[in-house]
Image (tube, helix red, strand yellow):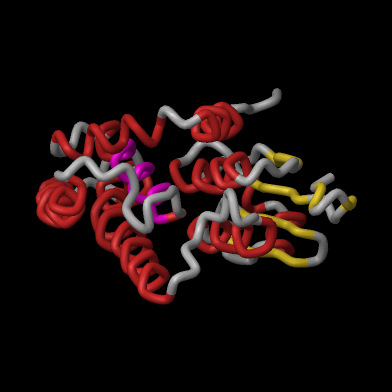
Amino acid sequence: MVTLNGKSARPLVLWGVGTSRTLRAHWALHELGLDYECRPILPRTGETQTQEYTELNPRQKIPLLQDGDFRIAESPAIAAYLSNTYGTRENALIPTDPREHATWLEWCFYAATELDATSLYVMRRHGALKHIYGEAPVALESAAVYFATQLRHAEQALQDGRPFLVGGRLTTADMLLTTCLAWAIDYRVPITSACRAYMERITSRPAYRSGLAANARRTV
């Protein structure tokens, strides 16, 4: 059960483990110090296509968060919802200042679209998942080049050694960028020294490490 302001609240249930996107949701829960139940289903195993899960999420994707009778999918939306609902002044993951909030949104869209969907996921589709989506060497190469080109934006912002992207504290934008950087390293896509140093700082956080462990946990 989640405890909010000393009171017993509705249980949080997170569906999904094993991917960069499910990691973001686990990480947010740990950053906010929330207890939750994990349903450790994986993609492309048939587990997202069961009747039970399809009724919860007709898109048959993970992660999915249940908060009582409320359901929310998409990892950036899950992390933002958790912060808005359960975050405190000390641990909130979204800035409140209007300009910082706008900058936070810009970073979130940048990471989720330019780095994740447009670059890294294209590489996943035609690399690790080529048996499903087909081989496309040109798409793989162009996606890697596009990622490197787009990463210059982050490099320029981080080359002064700033610890976080927005407002001097961790936000969900940092979580999105960090998971994209780790994903790129897994795919042997070079990242710049400033981005690597930033990623190492962020991934040293206890909540990241506990979220990573939760995301890897699979009971048999």
Across and down, in percent, residue 65 comes to: 67, 55
Q: Above or below — where is 182 with respect to 60?
A: above
Q: Residue furthest right?
A: 8
Does the magenta stretch mainly form a helix, a strand or a loop?
Answer: helix
The residue lying at 64 percent from left, 55 percent from top is: 88
Residue shown at the point (53%, 45%) measured from the top left: 22
Residue at image location 28% in from the left, 49% down from the top = 120
Which of the 4 image quarters holds residue 214? Answer: top right
Q: Which residues are magenta?
A: 173-183
Tell whether 93 sits left or right of 104. Answer: right
Quarter of the image with the N terminus is top right
Which residue is more in the foreground, 110 or 167?
Answer: 167
Can you give x and y, in whole percent of width and height, for residue 195 in the image? Answer: 21, 40
In the displayed structure image, the side of residue 19 where residue 2 appears, left or right: right
Can you name the residue that lies furthest to the bottom here? 98
x%, y% of residue 81?
61, 63
Q: Is residue 213 visible?
A: yes
Give the total of numbered labels.
Answer: 0
User: Residue 164, how many percent across, how many down?
Assistant: 34, 48
**If the image is split into quadrants, where does the C terminus sit?**
top right
Q: Is residue 143 visible?
A: no
Is residue 208 left or right of 214 when viewed as pictured? left
Left or right of residue 170: residue 193: left
Whether the magenta-drawn stretch holds residue 150 is answered as: no
